[in-house]
Image: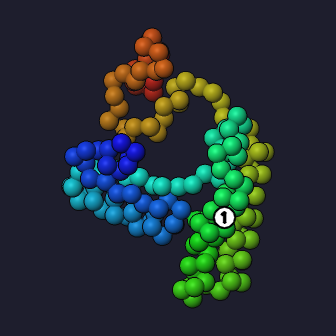
């Protein structure tokens, strides 16, 4: 079945335009409200479009044209679409949107610079699985890629078995 939102069989699902920021927001809000209200799980499929290929061995140009990608970028880009909505609905002016964009780019550039200037974190096995489970809900043994690679919870994190 290629309609992934239906693959839960008895679990309800939603298909959402993942290129529309407002649709994504509303779907996520609905899914959260649905789940915390005791209705059970919900499968959510966000349909998106990749501008590039999967990897260097897949440049994404053998099965689609550059014109197709450019058309999708110009007509369906999530950020451009949100900017257009803000202007069309008189929530912001074009100048304000440009100022938001400039401020966001400046902030990202600052964060990238900070990250590049920071030392890498120490590679320690006891923190490898931190913040994966809610404390107290950890599973007793987490299997690795191979059956022999398994990790069990100890008082201070995971221990290799």
In this rendered view, identify the residue nearer to me: 84 or 74: 74
Circle 1 packing at 10 Å, graded few (<14), some (14-19), many (20+), is few
> Which residue is pictured at 54% across the width and 86% down the height?
89
- For this view, does 44 lie left or right of residue 97? left
Q: Where is residue 21 in the image (x, y as percent from the top left)?
A: 51, 66
- For this view, does 28 lie left or right of residue 81? left
Mark 1 lies on a secondary structure that is helix
Quarter of the image that includes the N terminus: top left
> Which residue is pictured at 48% across the width and 20% down the height?
145
> Which residue is pictured at 32% across the width and 44% down the height?
7
**One can see residue 6 in this view:** yes
Please determine whether, in this image, residue 26 is positioned above or below residue 109: below
**One can see residue 159 in this view:** no
- For this view, does 125 lie left or right of residue 41? right
| Image-quadrant location for residue 26 | bottom left
In this rendered view, identify the residue nearer to me: 121 or 87: 87
Please determine whether, in this image, residue 157 is positioned above or below residue 97: above
Extreme residue toward the bottom, this view: 90
Quarter of the image that includes the C terminus: top left
Q: Position of residue 15 (x, y in %)?
A: 39, 57
Q: Where is residue 137 in the image (x, y as percent from the top left)?
A: 32, 35
Please determine whether, in this image, residue 58 is positioned above or below residue 48: above
In this rendered view, identify the residue nearer to me: 50 or 161: 50
> Which residue is pictured at 72% across the width and 77% down the height?
98
Q: Mark 1 points at which residue?
A: 71
Q: Colour mode?
A: rainbow
Q: Position of residue 59 (x, y in %)?
A: 71, 42
The tally of labels here is: 1
Please determine whether, in this image, residue 151 is positioned above or below residue 128: above
């Amino acid at each position: 079945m290629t309609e992934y939102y239906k693959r839960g069989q008895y679990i309800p699902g939603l298909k959402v335009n993942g290129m529309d920021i407002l649709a994504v927001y509303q779907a996520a809000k609905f899914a959260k409200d649905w789940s915390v209200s005791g209705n059970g799980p919900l499968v959510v499929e966000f349909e998106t479009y990749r501008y590039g290929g999967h990897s260097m061995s897949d440049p994404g140009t053998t099965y689609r044209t550059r014109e197709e990608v450019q058309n999708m970028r110009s007509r369906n880009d999530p950020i451009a679409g949100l900017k257009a909505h803000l202007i069309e609905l008189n929530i912001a002016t074009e100048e304000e949107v440009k100022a938001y964009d400039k401020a966001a780019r400046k902030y990202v550039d600052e964060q990238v610079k900070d990250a590049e200037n920071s030392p890498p974190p120490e590679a320690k096995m006891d923190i490898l699985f931190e913040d994966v489970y809610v404390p107290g809900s950890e599973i007793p043994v987490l299997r690795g890629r191979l059956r022999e690679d398994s990790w069990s919870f100890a008082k201070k994190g995971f221990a290799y078995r």
